Amino acid sequence: MGASPSENPTQQLAPSPCSAARRSIVVNAPVERTYAQWARIEDLPRFVTLLRNVQRMDDTQFSYTWGPNGEERRGVLHILLQIPCRRIAWRLLSDSLMSGVVSFEPRSKKETEVTLKIRSVFDPRKLSLRLEEYLDNFKRLVESEDAIK
């Protein structure tokens, strides 16, 4: 007979199913401007359509509201890693099953490849579609007159 989880603390219950998605896009903007636009975490709702009211709490944490399925929920986004002009990694403190990383790779002095990877409990197909939408929105923003110059 095997030990129950309470008798064997090293045995863990299976985690909730998580999916991951990865998408890339090339934007017509230098890597410095592309990175700076994404690093303005408070501006994420300009291209991540489910997010609203992102506000800085300290150097690495931001409160936010988001609206999945017409509901409004609150949470905290924690920046885990920030390498200027290269990468930003985060996780949601209110939802341990959501994390992501965005990478910036210069393709030329005027073009940057942006790669977004997300791990989530969302359906993999829907997650992929969301990433495509967010990257398309970001491309329009960073290439527009409203972008950080």
Image: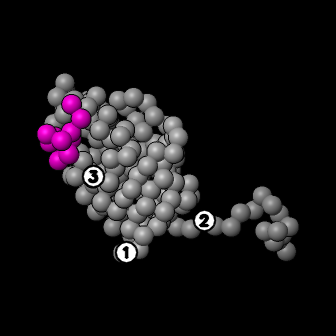
Q: Residue 20, located in which quarter of the rendered image?
A: bottom left
For residue 129, side relative to residue 140 (left or right): right
The answer to which of 112 and 125 lies nearer the viewer is 112
Residue type beneath disc 1 = Asn
Decide whether the magenta segment is chiefly helix, strand or loop: loop
Tell me residue 4's x, y (percent). Answer: 81, 71
Between circles 3 and 2, the one closer to the viewer is 3
Tell me residue 61's x, y (percent). Answer: 52, 45
User: Mark 3 or mark 2: which comes first in sequence?
Assistant: 2
Pointer 1 with pointer 3, Cβ within 8 A: no
Give the numbered dot on residue 15. 2
Q: Residue at 16% of width from left, 28% of height from top?
A: 110
How much space separates mark 1 and mark 3, taking CA atoms?
19 Å
**Which residue is situated farthest in the left direction here?**
145
| Residue at which label 3 appears | 46
Q: How many residues crowd mark 1 within 10 Å: few (<14), some (14–19), many (20+)?
A: few
